[in-house]
Amino acid sequence: MVTRPKVKGVTDGVLRIRRIDLTDVDTIFSGVSSSLEALSRWMPWASSGYSRDDACWFVANAWLAWRHQAAYEFLIESVADGRFLGLCGLNAISRDDGRANIGYWTVTGEYGNGVATTAARMTARFGFFQLGLTRIRLFHAVDNIGSQRVAEKVGFVLEGTQRKRMKLDGVLHDAKLYALTHPDEIMG
Ligand SMILES: CC(C)(COP(=O)(O)OP(=O)(O)OC[C@H]1O[C@@H](n2cnc3c(N)ncnc32)[C@H](O)[C@@H]1OP(=O)(O)O)[C@@H](O)C(=O)NCCC(=O)NCCS
């Protein structure tokens, strides 16, 4: 049974992940817009027509989903200057048996600084310790090497390849499936 979290954010002193607020629409729209080229290659929702309305829809849904324990979406920001670094979150939550899916992306100019790895670790710990999750699943297109490195560095265990799992730009791609089933599996 998934429990209600006691906190709305987590920090390691350098990065902070926090609940998305209704006032974050423009920040998210601007971050997605500037990263769209990379995002559209790997994320089914990211397309060249991405608009401010899409950002509004995402933020409103994220806010409501948190309230209804359906998903926990976080904004990733720099503690030092509040700079927007990306998004991460837990979605597709099965409240009866404590399973969820994890997702993340980093603003293009911030790649390679450990943002996604740190945010995914914090999100996974939040899932186990705050929500009482039993299994956190991750999947990415087989040739998404950046996401594969994040999964490996966080400690996700590779479970296999799912054929034709993700539709990207109208084409179905095979995806690698990983999971964490205990917080002790998280590395770093
Ligand atoms: C994949 C992604 C989240 C990585 O974000 P990041 O903040 O750069 O990740 P980190 O800095 O924590 O880096 C993790 C590792 O991935 C590597 N990496 C990051 N982007 C990479 C890329 N495009 N190609 C190859 N390796 C990449 C980093 O070098 C690092 O590996 P290393 O420590 O062995 O050098 C980012 O490239 C992204 O947002 N991509 C588009 C969206 C996406 O694919 N999301 C995941 C969908 S499941």
Image: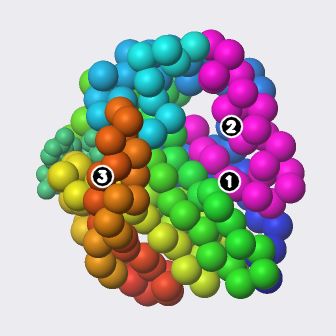
Residue 20 badge: 2
Q: Which residue is mark 3?
A: 173
> Alpha carbon of mark 2 to alpha carbon of mark 3: how far?
30 Å
Q: Are marks 1 and 3 in contact (CB under 8 Å)?
A: no
In the visual, does 159 lie left or right of 11? Answer: left
What amino acid is at disc 3? His
Instruction: Determine if the magenta segment contains residue 60.
Output: yes
- Residue 113 place in picture, x, y as percent: 25, 41
Instruction: Determine if the magenta segment contains residue 160.
Output: no
132 in relation to 125, above or below: below
Sequence order check, earlier mark of 1 and 2 = 2
Residue 188, quarter of picture: bottom left
- Residue 80 place in picture, x, y as percent: 45, 31
The residue at 67%/32% (across/down) is: 58
- Give the magenta range: 52-81
Q: Are marks 2 and 3 in contact (CB under 8 Å)?
A: no
The residue at 86%/55% (across/down) is: 68
9 or 23: nearer the eye? 23
In the structure shown, which secondary structural element does the residue marked by tag 3 occupy? strand
Q: Is mark 2 within 8 Å of ligand 1?
A: no
- Residue 77 place in picture, x, y as percent: 50, 35
